[in-house]
Structure formats: C-alpha cells, structure tokens
Image: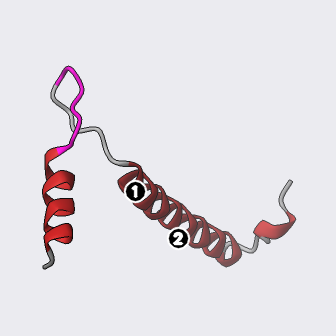
Amino acid sequence: MSGKEYSEVLIRLWLRWLTLTGELIPEPTEEVVAAKQEAEQAKRKAEQLAERLRQLGVNPDELV
C-alpha cells in the first residue's frame, strides 16, 4: 500500500459522523449500496408475487 493509499484509508476510517444518539451516519457510497440492495430485494419479491399470481391464474401484467 502506498503512502497516499494508506493516508486515504486512515482518513476514511477516522472521519465518520454519528448522530446525537450514537448512530453511525452512512457515507454516500454506503447509502447507494444499501439502496441498490433494497431495490434488488424488492424486485425479487415482486417477481415472486407475480409468479404466484400466475399460478393462481391471474396475469399480473393486466392488472390495473
């Protein structure tokens, strides 16, 4: 690890913000990762529900 990389790691580990109740405030990159994970989970759930509707004889693409 170069000196610059080492410094960035130290800064990254050091500069973290907490709320008044002690909860860690996520960095923007962490928020993006979490949002992508939540979106993927929602998509999987929607696909599962759509498949269940098809099994019941309902076309989910025609629902209003």
Q: Does the magenta stretch include residue 16?
A: yes
- Name the residue rendered at 76%, 67% in the picture: 60
Residue 6: x, y in percent? 13, 67
Q: From this view, report whether residue 34 is shown above or below residue 5.
A: above
As drawn, 55 above or below 46:
below
For label 1, the SS is helix
Magenta highlight range: 15-21
Q: Which is nearer the N-term, disc 1 or disc 2?
A: 1
Q: Where is residue 45 in the image (x, y as percent from the top left)?
A: 53, 65
Q: Residue 18 at x, y = what percent?
A: 21, 32
Which residue is situated farthest in the top direction here? 20
Q: Is 48 placed above or below 18 here?
A: below
Amino acid type indicated by mark 1: Thr
The amino acid type of the residue labelled 2 equals: Arg
- Label 1 Cα neighbours within 10 Å, binned few <14 / some 14-19 / many ≥20: few
Is 64 in the magenta? Answer: no
Name the spot of residue 57 as percent of width and height, x first. Answer: 75, 74
- Identify the residue at image location x=41%, y=49%: 28
Where is 53 relative to 63, above or below? below
Q: Name the residue under label 2.
A: 44
User: Residue 63's mark?
Assistant: none
- Quick one: SS at disc 2? helix
Closer-to-camera residue (40/31): 31
> Which residue is identified by label 1?
29
* Residue 8 image-quadrant placement: bottom left
Residue at x-position 34% and y-position 48%: 27
Q: Is residue 60 left or right of residue 49?
A: right
Q: Report how far apart the C-alphas of labels 1 and 2 lie in the structure.
A: 23 Å
- Direction from residue 57 to residue 12 in the image, left or right: left
